[in-house]
Amino acid sequence: MSDVLAAAPDEVVTNAIVQMVSLSAFGATGNLALITLDNGADHNRPNTFGPASLAALSAAIDEAQKSDAVAIAVTGKPFIFAAGADLSAMSFLKDKSQAVAIGDLGHEVFLKLHESKKPTFAFINGLALGGGLEVGLNCHYRTLATTAFTGLPECFLGLVPGWGGATLLPKLIGPENAVQVIILNALNNNTMMKAKDALSLGVVDAVYEPSDFIEHSVKFAADVLSAKKKIERKDFSKDSAGFEKAIATGKAAIAKKYSGAQIPSPLAALDLIKAAQSNSVRDGFAAETKVLADLVMSDSLRASLYSFNLIQKKRKKVEGAPKPALARKITRVGVVGAGLMASQLALLMLRNLKVPVVITDLDQERVDKGLAWIKNEIQKLVDKKRLSPESAARLLTNISGSVDKKIFANADFVIEAIFEELSLKQKLFKELEAIVTPECILATNTSSLSVEAMSEGLKNPERVVGFHFFNPVAIMPLLEVARTTKTDDATTATAINIGKDLKKTMVIVKDAPAFVVNRLLTRFMGEVTDAMDEGTPYEVADAAMAPLGFPMSSLELLGLVGPGVALHVAETLNKNLGPRYKISPTMQRFVKDGVKTFYVKDSNGVNTVNPAALALLEKGSTPSTAEQVRKRALEALATEAKMMLDEGVVSTPQEIDICMLLGSGWPMHLGGILPYLDREGISEAVCGARFHPKGVASLP
């Protein structure tokens, strides 16, 4: 125990405070021992469980057991139940015995609730994730606040639910529902359960409003204790068909998510779910500890935790951002363009900035089409009950359109999303400068063109900034903020402030060709298409990166990006950065003949090769193996990343990592792109040195 406590020296201890609640006013006799979890920090820091916190909970349960209380309940501080294990402690664990000890300690403490002769209740009053939800699962009964979110995100992080979740949940709600919560939700961008979902799945027994949640929960406990309320539990141990179906569903989801790569944590979680059919609780817990210890002492987990911690850090702080006090207030926004990208931008700003938004385009038909799309999307939100009719009505009063750019005269921020042609954007900015105020920010959503070149000839080039979103705008979390040599601090600070209001994770980048994500993606995808042009069979080239577990193959990504955009960016980079960015004759033919995807879906929704694309492939005579394609693609990434850091496109390797994690779907389990290249020895082989020190996203 002392070794485990020493492993996490910076633990913020979650205290467990016991108080007695009389049940007489609720229709039952005796007292309820109510344990409140509270780390004493502000409300923004959730309760977590490190070794000292587990020891505190253990002592509180012992105190409650020794008291005259007829039952025990656990709840959290306002709005937060518990967010699970203290993940910051994981990096301190250097020996497998420590990992086993922390797993055993959690099980030992939580079993006191599960095996208690006194009925135990979890009053889940707020956020309950991972080990937090597992506290509840180890209790005999559970209530949940309507505003609370719950989930088991461990597989998303490279772990398994290791304090009872993988064993108890299949027994409680059945194998198929357990696979949904543990595997499918985690792999679907870490989806959490809303209260109604947790109730319908059987994860909790009752749901109450937060205003009088504790009172209703105590009444629920009193009714159970006095036999006024009976909770029926189903025995799923004989449902062999259900377990087989659930495991098959989980395996299919994992294969689809990671393109067939063997990713340890979700597969291990499936094994634990399967074993739960016949395992006793204690046998299941022992199996969880073994799996958990193996995962904790793996580079895969360190990589996932690096990714997770980096994302959390970059959400809060933008490297190199000017002082927020320099930001100007935004009261009116203009969007030039009414196509799909522009309409997405307008909707995002409309919903998040809560100010009037105006769109323009070349003719009224285009404007009307853009406005209709925005209104339709708002109605979809109402239909899904994600937006009230009243809120929708307020939004609709703030959106308008025109064919006359003079409507931007009072705008504080105007962003363009027109065709990717430099001369058109230069002409547009000169037109806008004659209309808007000198303080109005002019932003461009360009993906590859020079922002500074767009500002040439302007009287106020200091208010021009790149504001590069990724498609789909509402979902992709990254925003590249491109600062030119002339962009001033007030413009940059305002752009960062807007990005925060839009709930984006931002990286300030130098105004360099294609910034970060598109430059690396184009180089990476270019190596794959170059190999095809040289004669490598498409199926070999496209499968080259499959062992890494990307969410889609290179040619699937091409269909998402579009050959037109891919070719345009490649041509821009070829012109600005040189011949290492080759112009693919295959891509040129695709664009010329209007071929937009390499794959098409058959009647069963399965990818099949588009015959039109196949007919246009360059027929080279020097094929490569999949391993050779993978090697050259990864070496190209290392080379390009080194050049970008040398050029000052970004200031740190971490910023390249966050861009690729959030802008290109670089897999979480690999850590950042640069730690992966370090671990594989590619960084040193190609660049002569690692990008990160040893021990970053890997075992020391």
Image (tube, rainbow, N blue to C red):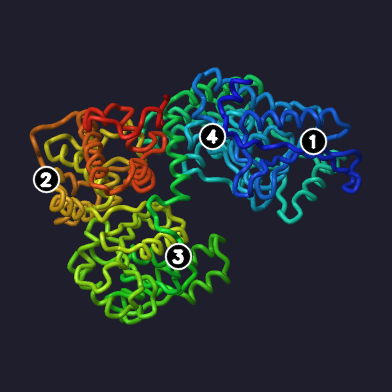
**Where does the C terminus fall, quadrant-wise?**
top left
**Residue 483 found in image quarter:** bottom left
Q: In the image, is 458 to the left or to the right of 50?
A: left
Q: Tell me, yes or no, whether the two marked residues, 1 and 3, touch with CB atoms within 8 Å.
A: no
Q: Name the residue under label 1.
A: 72
Amino acid type assigned to the residue bearing label 4 in the image: Leu
* Label 4 or label 1, whichever comes before in sequence order: 1
- In the rendered image, residue 16, in percent from the top left (x then y), is placed at 73, 36
Tell me the mark number nearer the camera, choosing from 3 and 4: 4
Q: Tell me, yes or no, whether the two marked residues, 1 and 2, touch with CB atoms within 8 Å.
A: no
Find the distance from the CA under tag 3 to the CA under tag 4.
38 Å
Q: Mark 4 points at which residue?
A: 87
Tell me the mark number nearer the camera, choosing from 1 and 2: 2
Find the distance from the CA under tag 4 to the CA under tag 1.
28 Å
Amino acid type assigned to the residue bearing label 3 in the image: Glu
View extreme (top): residue: 97
State the SS at label 1. strand
* Label 3 or label 4, whichever comes before in sequence order: 4
Q: Mark 3 points at which residue?
A: 377
